[in-house]
């Protein structure tokens, strides 16, 4: 049974499940941000825990396959090392999980913060979509909208 499960957990399947698996959570953030389901599944530890388990499993697979885990730290030294790290499917998938986890966290925060300031869902829809595709750009747009809407500039929230 365990062997069968491991044979299913290929890097490609983990990628597909991650990419498609976060979509319902994003739809909950956008359309039903204050529902009990969203509070349980998106604004709790459940989704980050699932993504962290996938992350740990890939690290485990890297170790089993004999790829040096320390290579991941070399990416901080220059752009060539970053390119080399991303050329390895396992490292690329780790960073995809990283990107996905941070973006869903950021989208959840923006949704809750917008609610806290009484912003309409339509007003934060575009920033949320941009966060889904490119986290920092959506965050900057949200901050701009928030400053004008809430008339408050805060860097510590």
Image: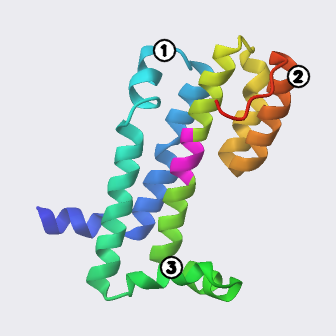
Asked whether the beta carbons under mark 2 and mark 1 sit within 8 Å of each other, the answer is no
Which quadrant holds the C terminus?
top right
Q: Which residue is mark 2?
A: 148
- How many numbered marks does the figure carry? 3
Q: Mark 1: few, some, or many residues within 10 Å (few <14, many ≥20)?
A: few
From the image, which quarter does the N terminus lie in? bottom left
Q: At x 85% / y 32%, what residue is drawn?
A: 144
Q: CA distance from mark 1 to mark 3?
A: 40 Å
Magenta portion: prevailing SS class: helix
Quick one: which residue is furthest to the top in this view? 118
Above or below residue 114? Residue 133 is below
Specify the label residue 35 is tagged with: 1
Q: Which mark's residue is nearer the viewer, 2 or 1?
A: 2
Residue 2, image x, y percentages: 13, 64
Mark 2 or mark 3, which is nearer the start of the sequence? Answer: 3
Q: Which residues are magenta?
A: 100-105
Please tell me which residue lies in front, 26 or 78. Answer: 78
- Label 1: element kind: loop
Q: Which mark is residue 145?
A: none
Give residue 73's mark: 3
Does the magenta portion include 101?
yes
Disc with the residue nearer the chain's start (2 vs 1): 1
- In the rendered structure, the answer to whether residue 41 lies left or right of residue 143 reads left
């Amino acid at each position: 049974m365990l062997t069968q499960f491991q044979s299913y957990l290929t890097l490609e399947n983990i990628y597909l499940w991650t990419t498609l698996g976060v979509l319902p959570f994003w739809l909950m953030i956008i359309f039903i941000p204050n529902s009990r389901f969203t509070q349980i599944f998106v604004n709790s530890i459940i989704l980050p825990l699932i993504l962290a388990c996938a992350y740990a499993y890939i690290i485990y697979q890297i170790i089993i396959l004999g790829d040096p885990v320390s290579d991941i730290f070399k990416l901080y030294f220059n752009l060539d090392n970053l390119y080399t790290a991303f050329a390895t499917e396992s490292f690329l998938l780790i960073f995809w999980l990283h990107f996905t986890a941070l973006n869903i966290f950021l989208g959840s925060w923006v949704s809750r913060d917008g609610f806290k300031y009484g912003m309409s869902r339509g007003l934060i829809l575009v920033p949320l979509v941009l966060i889904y595709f490119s986290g920092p750009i959506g965050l900057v747009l949200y901050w701009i909208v928030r400053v004008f809407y809430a008339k408050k500039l805060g860097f510590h929230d």
